[in-house]
Amino acid sequence: MKMIIAIVQDKDSNRLSNLFIEANIRATKLSTTGGFLKSGNTTYMIGIEDERVDEVLELIKDSSRTRQQFMTPPVNLDATMDATASYPVEVQVGGATVFVLPIDSFLQF
């Protein structure tokens, strides 16, 4: 048994939820916030049999897209900073961060 924790961008979460339903994969869906961009994420917790782990990982990979996005860095009041530091910069967002953990016990009540 494994616990898969998958963090995906909110824009990809509905598609992934539908794929999980179609594949009869039970997942707990949590609304989370990323620390760097402070944007919305969705975290899924999935308890799954060892032989289905690759199937779940493939669904996550297929539904999670990376994309480019502009963000404005936080304002810094330090006068020695370069003036261009307050202009928007392009960053890569999206994709998925996935953890696969061994589970000693899995119970449903």
Image (cartoon, helix red, strand yellow):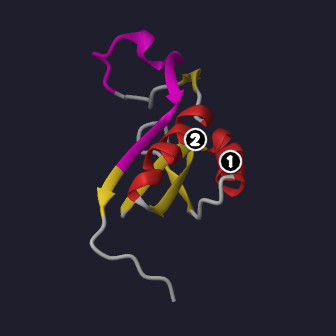
Q: Residue at x 44, y 10 (%)?
A: 84
Q: Which residue is tagged 1? A: 19
Q: Give the mark nearest the N terminus, 1 or 2.
A: 1
Q: Position of residue 88 (x, y in %)?
A: 54, 18
Q: Which mark is residue 65?
A: none
15 with respect to 96 (left or right): right
Q: Residue at x 37, y 28 (%)?
A: 77
Tag 2: residue type? Leu
Q: Quadrant of residue 79?
A: top left
Specify the segment rendered in magenta. Answer: 78-99
- Say which element carries label 1: helix
Q: Position of residue 45 (x, y in %)?
A: 48, 61
Q: Residue at x 71, y 43 (%)?
A: 15
- Mark 1 neighbour density, 10 Å: few (under 14) some (14–19) many (20 or more): some
Q: Which residue is tagged 2? A: 59
Residue 95 part of the magenta-drawn span: yes
Instruction: Identify whether 103 is placed above or below 68.
Output: below
Q: Residue at x 38, y 56 (%)?
A: 50
- Mark 2 neighbour density, 10 Å: few (under 14) some (14–19) many (20 or more): some
